[in-house]
Image (cartoon, grey):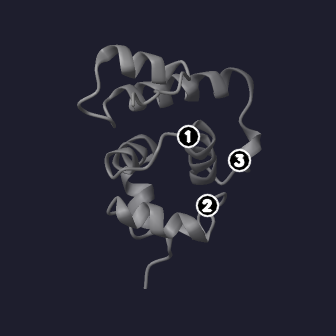
Amino acid sequence: MSDPVSSIRNLGPASDAVYARAGIDTADQLRTLGPDAAYRQLLQSGSKPHFVAYYAMVMGLQGRPWNDCQGDEKSALRARFDAIKAGGHDKGRSELEAALDMIGVVKRECR
């Protein structure tokens, strides 16, 4: 029997269901995919992008605590995260909406 995703450092029991929705059922599958491809699958399955969740997973795959990521390394991971996020987890949005989301502006619904 393969180890669950939650057996990877920094990924708790709730991670098993989130990753399973993306078709990633085991720790070995996650390791084989690598962090960027796996996170892309999470976003494509409907998970909302969250930088801390991304870098905690990256650190966990390296066997490191989630808060071990700092300085230039964290900046480089942020650039990777932004590129994955910009790759289109929300197809159908305008470029303006995607840009506003990237800088943290919450889209308001018109009524």
Picture residue at 49% right of the left edge, 39% below the top: 49
Q: Could you give the CA–CA distance between mark 3 and mark 2, rounded to whole angstroms?
A: 9 Å
The quarter of the image holding the N terminus is: bottom left
What label sits on residue 50 in the rendered view? 1
What label sits on residue 64 in the rendered view? none
Give the crowd class for mark 2: few <14, some 14-19, many >=20 residues within 10 Å. Answer: some
Q: Is residue 49 above or below residue 99?
A: below
Residue 63 in view of the camera: yes
Classify residue 63 as left or right of residue 15. right
Residue 41, image x, y percentages: 34, 49
- Report which residue position mark 3 lands on: 66
Q: For the residues labelled 3 and 1, say whether their Cβ atoms are less than 8 Å apart.
A: no
- Report which residue position mark 2 lands on: 11
Give the label, 3 or 1, closer to the camera. 1
Q: Quadrant of residue 13?
A: bottom right
Classify residue 78 as left or right of residue 40. right
Q: Nearer the viewer, residue 76 or 53?
A: 53
Residue type marked 2: Leu
Q: For the residues labelled 1 and 2, say whether their Cβ atoms are less than 8 Å apart.
A: no
Residue type marked 3: Trp
Q: Could you give the CA–CA distance between mark 1 and mark 2, rounded to whole angstroms?
A: 14 Å
Picture residue at 74% right of the left edge, 50% below the top: 65
User: Reading the chain from its start, which is encountered first: label 3 or label 1?
Assistant: 1
Residue 86, image x, y percentages: 37, 25
Give the label, 1 or 2, closer to the camera. 1
Classify residue 98 as left or right of residue 10. left
Residue 27, image x, y percentages: 47, 66
Query: Callout 3: helix, strand or loop?
Result: helix
Query: Callout 2: helix, strand or loop?
Result: loop
